[in-house]
Amino acid sequence: DKAPVFDAFDTVHDCLAVLSGAIGSAKFDKDRMAASLQAGFLDATEVADWLALRGVPFRDAHHVAGRLVQRAVKEGTTLSQLPLEAYQDEHEAFDDTIFHALDMETAVERRDVVGGPARGRVAGAIAELRGRLQARRGS
């Protein structure tokens, strides 16, 4: 009657062994990863958030961001390469600080909440998990 439990344990154990090997030998191409962040329009959320932080209702901010994405697609460019005038054509709240908000590192660091991707939060989570692992190994 305990066979499913043992089977599940064996499956998890095997998965962890494979995952450990995969992560341990993984190589990350940081330049390629950074370049891929510019593909698509991941930063459109930053445009909407930037406006919302300045009092524009998010629904309106979302529509403005959408129009800017459409313009960037039409012009064959990215949001960060659109001129300030393009932003100001869509909403009077825009100023040149929008370009700082579009930087992906800025976007990541702005999400400095528990479980968020900001460097300090990730480093803290890693440290906590290392501590737990060491405690387990010690007991």
Image (cartoon, rainbow, N blue to C red):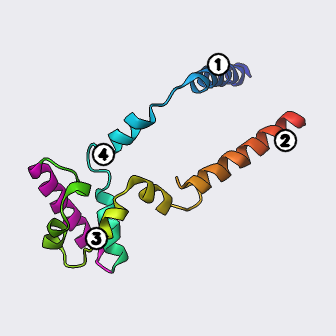
Q: Is residue 119 above or below residue 83?
A: above
Type of amino acid under label 4:
Gln
| Residue 1 in view | no
CA gap, disc 1 and disc 4: 37 Å
Residue 84 coordinates in the image, percent (x, y):
20, 67
Q: Earlier in the sequence, mark 1 or mark 4?
A: 1
Please, what secondary structure does the residue beneath circle 1 have? helix
Of labels 1 and 2, the one closer to you: 2
Residue 39 coordinates in the image, percent (x, y):
27, 42
Q: Which span is picked out in magenta?
A: 55-75
Image mark for residue 38? 4
Type of amino acid under label 1:
Asp
Type of amino acid under label 3:
Asp
Name the outermost residue toward the right.
Answer: 139
**Which quadrant, please, contains the C terminus?**
top right
Q: Is residue 120 above or below residue 7?
A: below
The part of the image, by quadrant, that contains residue 105 is bottom left
Q: Is residue 22 above or below residue 28?
A: above
Image mark for residue 14? 1
Bin the neighbour count of mark 2 within 10 Å (Cα to Cα): few under 14, some 14-19, many 20 and up: few
CA gap, disc 2 and disc 3: 49 Å
Q: Earlier in the sequence, mark 2 or mark 4?
A: 4
Name the outermost residue toward the left.
Answer: 74
